[in-house]
Image: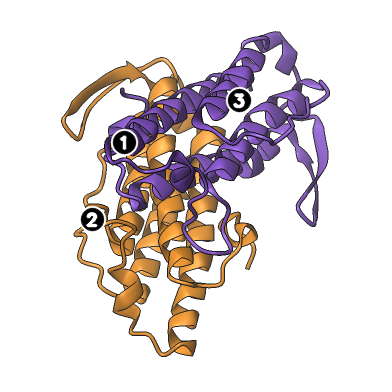
Chain colours: A orange, B purple
């Protein structure tokens, strides 16, 4: 359960940091206000880039904490700059680094119960991780990338996968 | 390795089928040529909806076959309709249904070597699955959804997660 969660979240957030750094550099190069990227959406009723990054980190901290029986730390959701998003990624990766495989002993079978939007979820830890937490996490990480690509930031799949 | 791959690929492809069905119904309702959705992209140098679905199924068949030491079946990549994309999803899910946990014995440590774009990849099966195959898979499944949301198809995260 550790192998399938902690290093995955950590590496994907690291890659998201690379994507965001390239976006910020591109904003400077094209003389675009960084807010234009940070508040961009793919549809009027979809969330902004900033929210996508915030929710990605929420999944990355929430799932391991729930599986390990720790309280999920609350973040303020008050980031308004690329620097603050990077700090949020770093804070989340620091939290992930505190977990060990022993923290996840038995978590595959233990029941996880939570509210997800308007749905009550109750399922074994393994299915919660693979069918709820991971799809949610990847949804927001990928949408963040897609928002930037849609806005002309020169990114490739290799960056998404973690290459500088 | 089975638990972390086969049911995940299968359930996500099932959810992608729900998303595509809603897109097709929406095209009918708005009197939009289905080709408009099928050939839509988020950026001129990104792939079309059809390609996103094709590549998602490529990941979903490729990873389990490589891990289980089976030859990866080749698909023609000639789908041009929603019906053909649904058939491709079904064919891939049928293939996934032929795997058993025993097929993946020892695959977490066995070395997987392949070309990914212009990169040579060589890593233990567990890391290949979690750091290459899954991110790639989710990338294309999410981008398919994002293309449709960007085109005004009424979809929500619940559909992405597999609710009708």
Please say if the residues under marks 2 and 3 sit with CB atoms less than 8 Å apart.
Answer: no
Discs 2, 1: same chain: no
Q: Residue at the location (39% across, 26% down)?
A: B18
Of the two numbered discs 1 and 3 on the same chain, state the one appearing first in sequence.
Answer: 1
Residue B102 percent coordinates (x, y): 71, 9
- Nearest to the eye among marks 2 and 3: give it: 3
**Residue located beneath label 3 in the image:** B88
* Image quadrant in which you'd find residue A119: top left
Looking at the rendered structure, which numbered label has been put on residue A75? 2
Q: Residue at the location (44% across, 55% down)?
A: A93
- Find numbered disc 2 in the image and state the secondary structure of the residue it sits on: loop
Discs 2, 3: same chain: no
Whole-angstrom CA distance, mark 2 to mark 1, is: 38 Å
Q: Quadrant of the C terminus of chain A?
A: bottom right
In the visual, does B78 lie left or right of A154? right
Chain label for disc 2: A
- Find numbered disc 3 in the image and state the secondary structure of the residue it sits on: helix
- The 10 Å Cα crowd at callout 1, few under 14, some 14 to 19, many 20 or more, is some
Q: Is residue A114 above or below residue B30?
A: above
Discs 1, 3: same chain: yes
Please say if the residues under marks 2 and 1 sit with CB atoms less than 8 Å apart.
Answer: no
**Residue located beneath label 1 in the image:** B26
Q: Tally the numbered discs.
A: 3
Chain label for disc 3: B
Q: Residue at the location (39% across, 33% down)?
A: B24
- The 10 Å Cα crowd at callout 3, few under 14, some 14 to 19, many 20 or more, is many
Residue A4 percent coordinates (x, y): 54, 34
Q: Is residue B132 visible?
A: yes
- Find numbered disc 1 in the image and state the secondary structure of the residue it sits on: helix
Whole-angstrom CA distance, mark 1 to mark 3, is: 21 Å
In the visual, does B79 lie left or right of B7? right
């Amino acid at each position: 359960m550790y192998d399938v969660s902690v290093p995955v979240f950590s590496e994907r957030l690291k890659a998201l940091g690379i994507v965001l750094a390239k976006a910020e550099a591109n904003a400077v190069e094209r003389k675009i206000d960084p807010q234009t990227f940070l508040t961009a959406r793919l549809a009027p009723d979809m969330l902004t880039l900033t929210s996508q990054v915030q929710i990605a980190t929420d999944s990355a901290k929430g799932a391991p904490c729930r599986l390990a029986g720790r309280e999920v730390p609350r973040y303020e959701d008050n980031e308004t700059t690329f620097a603050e998003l990077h700090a949020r990624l770093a804070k989340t990766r620091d939290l992930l680094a505190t977990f060990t495989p022993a923290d996840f002993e038995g978590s595959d079978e233990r029941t996880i119960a939570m509210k997800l939007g308007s749905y009550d979820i109750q399922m074994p830890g393994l299915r919660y991780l693979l069918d709820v937490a991971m799809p949610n996490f990847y949804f927001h990480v990928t949408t963040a990338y897609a928002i930037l690509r849609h806005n002309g930031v020169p990114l490739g799949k290799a960056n998404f996968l973690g290459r500088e």
